[in-house]
Image: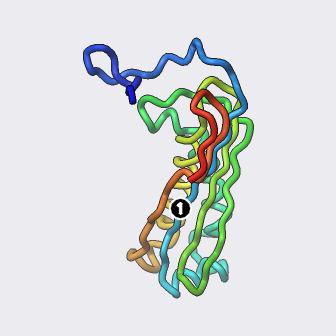
Amino acid sequence: MEFNHFDHKGNARMVDVSGKDETCRTAVAEGVIRVSREVMDAVCGRKVRKGDVLTVAQVAGIMGTKKTSELIPMCHPLSLNNAEISFEIREEEGEIRACCRASAEGKTGVEMEALTGVSTALLTIYDMCKAIDKRMEITGIHLVKKTGGKSGDFCY
């Protein structure tokens, strides 16, 4: 496998996508934050002093997808068609699963946008709940699937 993020001298560079075809690109990423019963009760009961945790985290995750190229040095700025953040509450397991779906028409994929979106959403939950309990754990952030582009489809 050849890595094309390096020039002939081994220096990091942005990949030249000028010769690639524009295609419909989609990506889905997910991750989990493990929380205490006290945090879970506060989130589900909308009793966190900073506001409605999941609504704020949803907006933050979408914002994260849009700012990816400003955070990850070699990412291309993309014009996203859509970005969605959803949550699954697993009360008994003490987990909140976040899922980010991103799509664009372009010459490069949206995997990094989906991963950044889910990471930002989970970090926002942590930030909003850390006054209750700092022992939360963010884990399992990964690409679930992607479609489009030269490398084809991927499913975890």
Judge from the rendering whether residue 53 lies leftward or rightward of residue 126; answer left or right.
right
Percent x, y of residue 111 = 56, 41
- Report the residue that reaches farthest toward the left: 9
User: Pointer 1: what residue?
Assistant: 31
SS category of the residue bearing label 1: strand
Q: Residue at x 67, y 49 (%)?
A: 101
Chosen colour scheme? rainbow
Judge from the rendering whether residue 152 lies leftward or rightward of residue 16; answer left or right.
right
User: Which one is nearer the viewer's eye here, 50 or 112?
Assistant: 112
Percent x, y of residue 11 = 29, 21
Percent x, y of residue 117 = 57, 50
Residue 64's place in the image compared with 92, above or below, is above
Judge from the rendering whether residue 126 lies leftward or rightward of residue 117; answer left or right.
left
Residue 19's place in the image compared with 151, above or below, is above
The three-letter amino acid code for the residue at tag 1 is Gly
Determine the image quadrant of residue 40.
Answer: bottom right
Residue 141's place in the image compared with 71, above or below, is below
User: Which one is nearer the viewer's eye here, 48 or 143?
Assistant: 143
